[in-house]
Image (cartoon, rainbow, N blue to C red):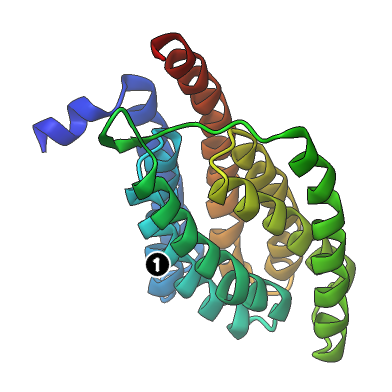
């Protein structure tokens, strides 16, 4: 335990403790019987902490979170979230896990080598994103997904995030932050009808803070790695 604590900075420890405390508090206040949401939320914020360090363990935890979140989304008829996380985020987290393990920085498997995307890749990415968004829009419409425009935009931001994660770009964290904002809005709408979903709103608010920190951390990591090369 002491070794694990020393691995994370004081800022990271405070960030995790604050996020976990808010999630548990929201669970006690609004979601006493929703153990699945509590487990998913705690796994999710923990994965963000490891991701911020460029540690592949974060991607492994993201696979588990995606599975649990898919079930939660199915229960609320948020089929867009269910399809996105089970059909895209979870498989891409697996691919990202393999990619991160294959690209350790100087042989250190607890830190991935930060990648810089080529110009052509930045040009192709919007085209790929638009194509994926269009396909998912019709799928979600067919299943009468709740709040279709927001759910579709969630697919857009999610695809950007998982692609950039797989490619080891620091911008993945910012894409996930944008997705967090969309998800806060989606689950706030659900919470207006069923108060227990406030737990999920708090969860993604914590995710937003974690992803913003992750972006800052990866930018620092990229500069440090560039200096050591």
Q: Residue at x 26, y 33 (%)?
A: 107
Give the total number of marks visible in the rendering.
Answer: 1
Give the quadrant of the C terminus.
Answer: top left
Farthest residue in the top direction?
227
Farthest residue in the left direction?
2
Q: Circle 1 — which element?
A: helix
Q: Residue at x 45, y 9 (%)?
A: 227
The x, y position of residue 53, in whole percent, is: 39, 33
Nearer-the-camera pick, 45 or 94? 94
Q: Residue at x 11, y 38 (%)?
A: 1
Nearer-the-camera pick, 29 or 49? 49
Nearer-the-camera pick, 21 or 53? 53
- Camera sees residue 125: yes
Side of 93 relative to 42 (left or right): right
Side of 172 relative to 25 (left or right): right
Label 1: which residue? 64
Disc 1 residue crowd, few under 14, some 14–19, many 20+, Cα 10 Å: some
Nearer-the-camera pick, 131 or 53? 131
Side of 163 relative to 68 (left or right): right
The x, y position of residue 95, in whole percent, is: 48, 61
The x, y position of residue 209, in whole percent, is: 56, 36
Side of 185 relative to 19 (left or right): right
- Camera sees residue 21: no
Q: Is residue 15 above or below residue 182?
A: above
Q: Is residue 16 above or below residue 144?
A: above
Q: Is residue 91 above or below residue 53?
A: below
Q: Residue at x 87, y 60 (%)?
A: 130
The x, y position of residue 28, in whole percent, is: 41, 60
């Amino acid at each position: 335990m002491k070794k694990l604590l020393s691995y994370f900075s004081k800022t990271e420890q405070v960030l995790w403790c604050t996020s976990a405390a808010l999630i548990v508090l929201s669970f006690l206040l609004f979601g006493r019987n929703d153990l699945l949401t509590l487990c998913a939320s705690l796994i999710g914020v923990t994965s963000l902490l490891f991701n911020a360090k460029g540690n592949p363990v974060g991607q492994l935890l993201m696979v588990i979170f995606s599975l649990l979140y898919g079930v939660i989304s199915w229960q609320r008829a948020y089929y867009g979230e269910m399809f996105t996380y089970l059909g895209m985020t979870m498989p891409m987290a697996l691919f990202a896990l393999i990619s991160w393990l294959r690209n350790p920085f100087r042989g250190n498997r607890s830190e991935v080598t930060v990648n810089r995307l080529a110009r052509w890749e930045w040009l192709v990415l919007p085209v790929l994103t638009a194509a994926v968004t269009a396909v998912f829009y019709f799928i979600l419409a067919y299943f009468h997904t709740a709040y279709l425009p927001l759910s579709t935009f969630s697919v857009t931001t999610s695809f950007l995030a998982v692609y950039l994660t797989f490619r080891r770009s620091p911008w993945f964290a910012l894409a996930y932050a944008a997705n967090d904002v969309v998800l806060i809005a989606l689950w706030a709408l659900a919470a207006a009808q069923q108060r227990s979903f406030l737990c999920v709103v708090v969860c993604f608010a914590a995710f937003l803070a974690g992803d913003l920190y992750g972006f800052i951390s990866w930018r620092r990591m990229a500069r440090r790695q560039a200096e050591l090369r």
